[in-house]
Image (cartoon, rainbow, N blue to C red):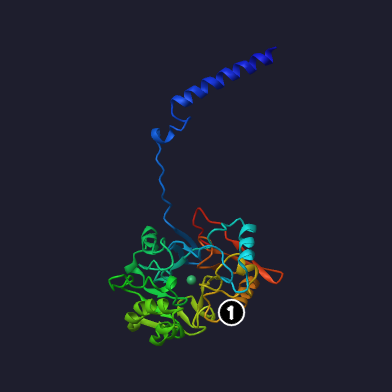
Amino acid sequence: MAREDDVALSRRRLLAGVSVAAAAGFVGGASSVMAKAPMQNTQAPAFYRFKVGAIEATVVSDGPLPLGEPKSDIFIGLSKEQLGQALTDNFLPTDNVVLQQNALVINTGDRIALFDTGMGASKMLGPDTGRLTANLKAAGIEPKDVDAVVLTHAHPDHCFGLMADDGARNFPNAQIYMAQADFDFWTDEGKLANDAIKAFIAGARKQLLPNRDRMVFVKDGQEILPGVQAMSAPGHTVGHTVYMIASQGKTMCNAGDIAHHHVVVVESPRLEFAYDTDGKQAVSSRLRVFDMLAAQRLPLLAYHFPWPGLGYLAKRGDGFRYFPAPLQMVLDQQA
Ligand SMILES: [Zn+2]
């Protein structure tokens, strides 16, 4: 008997609760009119800081790069269905393949170097790019304080942020480091006749040619800054270069575009990418760098992997698996 009374009491309370809620505007579609908590619709500034020995490293985002719906041969030989299935299997959206743009900044205590510059003012590869400068400033780094801009290669999403639309330098005090092979290829006037890469060539000429006098051409194996060693990894472009960054016994790899997708080309590293200049060479460079990183258990920063793109690779069968590094909520002095 006591139990039925309890039930009746609960029901009365429930009904009373509903009428209070309705009066407050939570029920019956009145919520939009009565909203007292407007949505912010903004995201936190996109920078992430970590340490490499005594070096302070900061990843800054230039914003997402949407490749659009899965299509056959974005990764050569992979059908639209196979790509869609790989995305589904990994809980990734199947209506748009989105790559990130994770640019690395290192502060050695003496000098500040930025690796790659994002899209700058160009919206050629999507509407949400061009956020690098704002994110740098949010991270407390002023573009005028950048001493070196180091390019992994001269594709739009890596070098179009060198110059502002009005022709001013975005990093007015920086020397620019890149492979000469990429400079020569992407500024070659003769390639303006090639419709497939014409827009890339025209843009790269606008970015690179005015900076010719402050450019340092890097060689394979060269230590370009204290603790920063260039490692030639061609194929994606003719001069694509990754950079090993070392301090106090810690080492990481700024891997640029050694791989474009954290699942597809990590699990199947022999897949060529539609935007590779020489896909077969890109695969052999990828396997060489991946093998080294996996064997030595070294972290990499991958420009296009999910934010912030910092993680590890391990061998899995014929391919690899990517393990994102846990984000640190407090800066570890000895990461
Ligand atoms: Zn890229």
In the rendering, at what x and y percent does residue 126 appear? 43, 64
Q: Is residue 294 left or right of residue 208?
A: right
- The residue that disc 1 covers is 285
Q: Quadrant of the C terminus?
A: bottom right
**Image location of residue 171, percent across then percent down:** 33, 71
Q: Is residue 107 left or right of residue 275?
A: left
Query: What is the three-letter code of the residue carrying label 1?
Result: Ser
Residue 307: image location, x then y, percent: 51, 60
Number of labels in the image equals 1
| Residue 221 in view of the camera | yes
**Is residue 193 or residue 332 the one in the foreground?**
193
| Vertical placement of residue 192 versus 132, above or below | below
Q: 159 or 45, which lies in front?
A: 159
Q: Which residue occupies the extreme bottom position in the image? A: 190
Residue under the image location 61 percent in, 72 percent down: 293
Instruction: Identify the image quadrant of the N terminus.
Output: top right
